[in-house]
Amino acid sequence: MDLISNAAESMSTKTSDLEKPSKGVQDTSYDIVYFRSFTDIPNAGKISEMLGAESIVKRNYPEGLDLIKPMIPYFEARYKSADALIKANGITQVVEFAAGRTPRGINNPQWHFIHTDYDTLALSQMSGIADALMKGRRRPVFSKLNAITGEGIEDIIGTLRKGPVAVTHEGLFSYYPPEYRAKVAGNVKKVLEARGGIYITPDLNSNEMLNEFQKITDFAAVQKRRQENTGRDLDAFRFESTEAAIRFMEQLGFDVEVHNMGDLFYHLASVDALFKEEEENRKILNVYENFKILKMKLR
């Protein structure tokens, strides 16, 4: 089956604003900021406090965090896995699409890091936080980019230096059906065609992952809350499997390597912080160790 040409079947009546992310979608980055505060990712706790993320998350999840708590280590796993793959490839300039309120650029001043987002508030907030936390170290470049339409992509390419670049994003694909994911990948290709390099993403968002999440939480209830918060039919936007995701990216002109996240992170601090019983701790860690992340190059 051609996964791209048949993508229109997955569209929802709730997604008429896909090219311009809604406030509900943009505000999910506060959730991730707060979830990262349970980790040992540098500056994660500070940024959560500076943004008041906890109070926003409590509004988004009025029933409390017990339901989503088993998923919190996922956000640590994907951040650490992407970081590890970038570093393993020795690339010193990085572009993150839909970076939201990630600390990645702040935590890696050795990189020429371009922090992009469509949300101008997020860009302004993170620019101010970088000034406060980096104390004269090389700060990220903050630049507006619509990852779907490509508006702003030429400005991004213009800020790159000579040499290869790593392009990454976390969570972006979960808000879009296949034809929009193809548009994102097309904009990634423009960056790689200009400088060469690699494309790294944990955004498989597959039914395989859903089955794993269901082992540790009531994922249907979590998804219902996330869909209410974002106004997106997120259930319609999943890949069937890792293999389907690989075929999708290959159709777009990428060579794909698949890595286990568990081979890339050595510890998930949030598992220890949130789950004190050894059996539950091990069960949750096992789920995330086997999640996948893709590293790609242009064919």
Image (cartoon, rainbow, N blue to C red):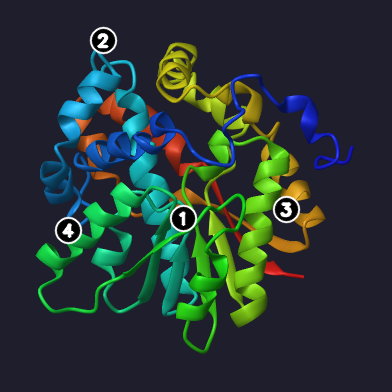
- In the shown orientation, is residue 158 left or right of residue 53? right
Kindly identify the amino acid type of the residue bearing the numbered disc 3. Answer: Met
Kindly identify the amino acid type of the residue bearing the numbered disc 1. Answer: Asp
Which label belongs to residue 63? 2
Q: Which residue is mark 3?
A: 249
User: Which badge, 1 or 2, is on the more N-terminal residue?
Assistant: 2
Kindly identify the amino acid type of the residue bearing the numbered disc 4. Answer: Ile
Kindly identify the amino acid type of the residue bearing the numbered disc 2. Answer: Glu
Which label belongs to residue 8? none
Which secondary structure, mark 4? Answer: helix
Q: Percent x, y for residue 107?
A: 25, 65
Q: Which residue is mark 4?
A: 129
Real-space CA distance between mark 2 and mark 3, rounded to the nearest whole angstrom? 38 Å
Which label belongs to residue 263? 1
User: Which badge, 1 or 4, is on the more N-terminal residue?
Assistant: 4
Real-space CA distance between mark 3 and mark 4, rounded to the nearest whole angstrom? 35 Å
Q: Is residue 252 visible?
A: yes
Residue plotted at (63% across, 79% down): 194
